[in-house]
Image (cartoon, rainbow, N blue to C red):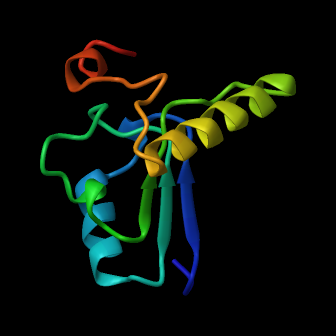
Amino acid sequence: MKHHASFINTARGAVVAEDEMIEVLGERPDLFALLDVTHPEPPIEGSPLFTLRNVVLTLRIAGSAGRECHRMGKVMADEISRYTHGVGLEYEITESQAATMA
């Protein structure tokens, strides 16, 4: 990839050679990956995807449009505010819940 390129995947996690992507991202801090999907979902415990500084993992939100995007943005901003102020999250998802979510 060109220097300072960004890779965005909102399709399916399995279309990416994840181990190779992780290796390249570890060697090339100039690259950036934004992943709406992984394979498996969520990534396995201890995956470098959780700790690489040039990777952002998001919850699966593909297919949203219009006012729904505004609503989701407000919800996310509100949750970040709660988190940074040490207040309980309104929409917290536990690890056990995440294991059963699509």
* Residue at (27% x, 12% y) in the render: 100
Task: Residue at 13% x, 42% y: name it.
Answer: 45
Residue 92 position in % (x across, y down):
39, 25
Q: Report the label total.
A: 0
Residue lying farthest left?
Answer: 46
Q: Position of residue 52 (x, y in %)?
A: 31, 67
Q: Which quarter of the figure has residue 38?
A: top left
Expressed as whole percent of the image width and height from the top left, the position of residue 71 reads 75, 27
The residue nearer to you, when weighing 98 against 41, is 98
- Residue 69 rendering spot, x and y as whole percentages: 76, 31
* Residue appearing at x 26%, y 33% in the figure: 40
**Residue at point 80% right, 27% down?**
65
- Residue at the extreme top of the image, as rendered: 100
Image-quadrant location for residue 15: top left
The quadrant of the picture occupied by the C terminus is top left
80 or 58: nearer the viewer: 80
- In the picture, measured across the screen, residue 21 lies left or right of residue 71, that is left
Q: Is residue 72 left or right of residue 2?
A: right
Q: Quadrant of residue 28?
A: bottom left
Q: Identify whether 38 is placed above or below 95.
A: below
Is 11 displayed left or right of 28 in the figure?
right
Residue 9 left/right relative to 99 = right
